Amino acid sequence: MVSVTGGNAAADVTSYVGRRDQASAVRRLLGTARLITLTGPGGVGKTRLARRVAQEAARAFRDGVRFVGLAELRDAPLVPNAVADALGLQQRSTRAVARLIVDYLRDRQVLLLLDNCEHLLDASAELAHAVLTECPRTVILATSRQSLGLAGEHLLPVPPLPAPDEETTRPAELPGYPSVELFLDRVSATCPSFRLTEHNAADVAKLCRDLDGVPLAIELAAARVRSLTPRQINERLADGLGLLASGQRRPQRHRTLRSTIDWSYRLCSPQEQAVWARASVFAGTFDLDAAEQVCAGPDIEPGAVLDLLEGLLDKSVLIREDVGDHARYRMLETLRAYGCERLAELGEDTAARRRHRDWFDRLTATADAEWVSPHQLVWTRRLHHEHANLRAALDWSVTEPGEAGVALRMTARLDEYWGLRGSGPELQTWLTRALAAAPPDHPARARALTTLALFSVWQTEFDTAEALLNEAEGVLDRDADPLAAPFVTSVRALSAVVQVQPSSRDLAAAAAEEFRALGEVRRELHPLFLHAVAAAFMGDLATGRAVLRRMAKLTEECGETYYRNMSQFGVAVIESQFGDVDAAAAAAAAALRGDLKIGSGLPAAYNIDALAWVATRRGEYRRAASLFGAAAAVWDSHGVAPDIAVSVPHNHNLAIAKGALGEAEFDAAFQIGRALSPDEAWHYALGQPLPREPAEPAAPMTLTRRELEVAELVAEGLSNRAIAAKLVISVRTATTHVQHILTKLGFANRAQIATWVAHRRSELATPGRPHRHT
């Protein structure tokens, strides 16, 4: 026998989509392991995967594959009976049935598929143990929301299907995602006329993404396309899970998405249920410290939360993700939405969200206090992982009546962190919302207005910044924060420096002195940088250098990284323009290494640009052009113009390099730099050679017209996905074109394609030169 037989073993009536990697992993284990358990949340596709693999592996088991469906059982003593039924055995008492099963399987080569063990875990484990101990040729493939807990058990988590990210919305891009492939396959069965178009592609992508790639949820959503558009389904999903119901003849536990999650919920203890509901207020991932504060309550001590989290992990309600040496947890969006509903039913929604917000208010306060310290790198990484939770805390604060003042306080902190992320526009949004929601006389208003002005300057919104600073000055008397007034002076100094105003030097010096008088070293540092640069560009190199030395000394005493890198960048600015070019190169390289250490992409671009100025001073114009291109790619990704902070040296050196090379040659070298990956750009900036760039490739194969088109887009720095979107082709097709180009030209990476394109453009632009490789 080679088919899957046994109780509830009806053949699949729909096609199987995705899971090639997981299926291969299970097949490999079937050759070596005796007990394999597929784990994961309800509806993720454990049963379908197990059945599929069992069907494919049936010929390897001489005595067949037997399917044992346990989902409909409620009594543990009936587990042996269900197995006996699947094996076709006559049953007597429960005890005798278990022995009968073992005796039957003892000398047989059988794959036993135990499906849905989670609610009968002990009974399933007991029977599996007996079979594994006494039946050496029998292999058990189980599905469960948690482990059977037996020695020798191999656990294989079944993840959701990959879903498109928010930027993937083109029809040509989406079919490569298994979640979309499943959706389209199921829709075709009920609505054959449905097509993926420019009009509905973004809605289909959002649907698969919001359903976390969970196959059951996607199939239920696909069934609704008979009467609703994908956009309408998305709108109704926002109101709850009840829409995803089905009258089809699927297992009762899978008739609705709610029922399959109910199934998981009933498996939890009352305290686990409470933690599930309370943890639903987290966005993204969370750690144990946060969980102990948010999920504890009158019924649960903080010290008990860890054990309850482990219970939810065992039941596949939570997923663990290790970040460095710390564990973080997350919940699939469908399970989180269910938890939110339960939380509201318990009447705990407001209390839990306030605990969540208060925890992250305290967290940002601690991070703010320790920012200029040896702990800075740790805080940078931690805040990065908590960013989704910071958003959730801010959102609740600006929408919950009476809570916007806390949002003002939170957003006024850690402006350096938001800048490191390149998230200034997002912070501007939060500040604007918080200012609109908070009372006009709130004491934190002046500081919030000034922080908003700071990021307005970085966006070159100078008139807006000036109006905000004037408003902040008008309410300073209400702000008990002694730093509010010098902070206004500091932002005015930044605006003056960026706009190259004569007042910049005096404003920066005044701001630094005001902070120094308050003993506020952290806030003194940025005005010191501004003072140094302004003094140097006004001809006072001695003061500029002296101020930077003071800044560097303060940062070294604090043991921090962010402002130390800034002081080194200041050295690079001054020395590259007015002094020792070798000192400028060393300072910019050291600052770049520091930026990479702290994960600071945007400041890294400034240091790459500074190294371009150095190359210009040294007459290395092609290198300068490539470095300008590499920096531009980073700036573009952050939506920042390159000449905001350092317009004079940037524009001056750019013009020199372009004049030395000529427009065509400069552009060719610039595009080579722009096409580098971040890693390649950093390595090149720090002195390593560009990837191999043969100036005259030896008689390569001819590129097709489409391949030439793709090569041009590669040279512009576009990814395969972006190329696919621009040319309205699939990502797979774009990838194939790039691979063909690499093969034909004998290249190893995209930077070499960019180099080749640059040479080709130069040849085409030169009259009389042969036009090769076309």
Image: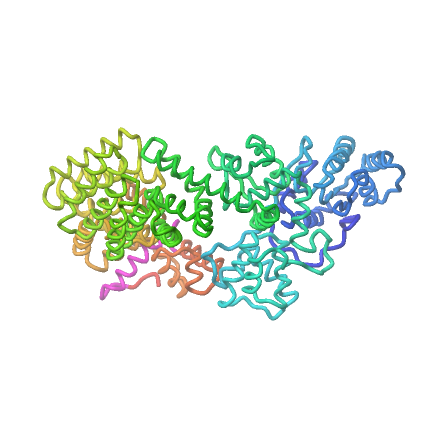
Viewer-closest of 632 and 774: 632
Q: Position of residue 478 (x, y in %)?
A: 30, 45
Q: Does the magenta-highlighted stretch encompass residue 530? A: no
Q: The C terminus appears in which quarter of the rendering?
A: bottom left
Residue found 35% across the figure and 42% down from its top:
413
- The residue closer to the viewer here, 588 or 2, is 588
Instruction: Give the quadrant of residue 234.
Output: bottom right
Answer with the quarter of the image where residue 716 lies: bottom left
Residue 511 versus residue 496: which sits nearer the camera?
A: 511
**Residue that protrudes farthest toward the left in the picture:** 539
Q: Residue 596 at what x, y percent from top left? A: 34, 40
Tell me, yes or no, if residue 669 can be seen here. no
81 or 609: nearer the viewer? 81
Left or right of 613, for residue 223: right
Q: Is residue 171 above or below residue 29?
A: below
Residue 534 at x, y = what percent? 16, 45
Which residue lies most toward the top here? 557
Res 488 seen here: yes
Q: What secondary structure is the stretch in magenta mostly built from?
A: helix
Seen at 19% across and 58% down, the residue is 662
Q: Which residues are magenta?
A: 745-770
Colour scheme of the picture:
rainbow
Q: Position of residue 222 (x, y in %)?
A: 62, 61
Counting the numbered discs, the total is: 0
* Residue 762 among magenta residues: yes
Say if 291 sits above or below 630 in the image. Answer: above
Q: Is residue 696 left or right of residue 745?
A: left
Q: Residue furthest bottom?
A: 193
